[in-house]
Amino acid sequence: MHILLLSYGCSHNDTSDKLIDHYDELNVSMQNYFNEKDLPTFTGKYVEVKVKNIIKYNFNGKDTYIYDVIIAPIYNQKTVISGIRLSSVEYGKETDKFYYEPNDSYEKLKKGNYTYESIDQILANEYQFFLADYSEQYGYSLTAEQFESCLTNICMTVTINDYKDNVELTNLQVVDYSDEFADNEIIKIITKENILHSSIHAYVDIDWYGDK
C-alpha cells in the first residue's frame, strides 16, 4: 500500500514524516541513496546532498573539475523540484560567472519532469556537472584563493515546492583522475565524443532502466 502525498507549496512543506522511515516503500533510487552511508552528507531544510566525488580531469589542456553528487528530498510529501543553482559560500554574487555553465542549464527545470505525487515516485537524483576557469570567455577574474574556495565551498540552492533550500557543501575534497573513475558519465562522454556534458538522472544503475 502506498501513501498518497497531498502537501504542496512553500507554506505547506511538511516536516513531520521522513522518507527514511518508509525505506521499503521507496523508489529504488531513494533506497540506493540511503544505502550510501559513507559519503560526505550536507543537509538543508527539505533536501539533503551526498557528494560522491570531485575529479580533476585534464580536458583539451584545461583543468576541469567534474562533480558527482546525489540530491534527495528528506520528507514524505508531494514534491516538486524546479531548479538547482550553484554559488560560492564565501563570495556570493561576486563569483556568479564562475558557475555560469551549470546554472544556465539547471537553475530552472521543467516541473513536470521533477514532480513526485506519491512516495514510490520520489526520486533521488544524481547530478553530474563540471566547473572550469572560463574567465576569459565570460569576462571575470578570480584570485587563487577565490578559485579554490569556489571549487570546494559551494552553496547548492535547490528549489523544492517553491522554497529555495540552500545547502552548503563545504570543505570538499578534489582528487586527481585515475582509471577508477573511467565509468563517470561525463568522462565517458569526453572519451567518446570529446565534449563536456552535464546531466541529472535517477540514482540507479543504467541496467535498471533496461529492466523496466
Image (spheres, grey):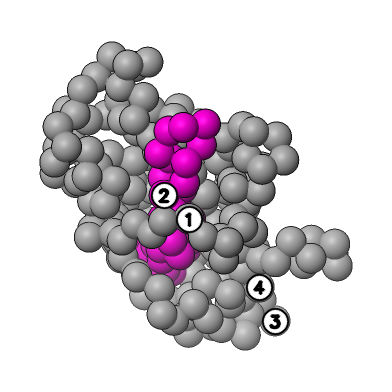
Rendered residue at 22%/60% (across/down): 171
Q: Nearer the viewer, mark 4 or mark 1?
A: 1
Rendered residue at 47%/46% (across/down): 57
Which residues, given as a range, are shown in magenta?
46-75
Q: Secondary structure at mark 2?
A: strand
Circle 2 crowding by C-alpha within 10 Å: few under 14, some 14–19, many from 20: many
> Does 49 lie within the magenta span?
yes
Q: Which residue is mark 4?
A: 28
Q: Secondary structure at mark 1?
A: loop
Residue 175 is situated, as x and y percent measured from the top left of the image, at 38, 59
Residue 186 is situated, as x and y percent measured from the top left of the image, at 59, 46
Q: CA distance from mark 4 to mark 1?
A: 29 Å
Tag 1: amino acid: Tyr
Residue 211 to residue 192: above or below:
below
Q: Which residue is mark 2?
A: 56
Q: Which residue is mark 1?
A: 177
Circle 1 crowding by C-alpha within 10 Å: few under 14, some 14–19, many from 20: some
Q: Secondary structure at mark 4?
A: helix
Tag 3: amino acid: Met
Mark 1–mark 3 CB contact (< 8 Å): no
Q: Nearer the viewer, residue 65 or 11?
A: 65
Tag 2: amino acid: Lys
Is residue 28 visible in the rendered image? The answer is: yes
Q: Earlier in the sequence, mark 4 or mark 3?
A: 3
Quadrant of residue 55 within the rendered picture: bottom left
Q: Nearer the viewer, residue 17 or 135?
A: 135
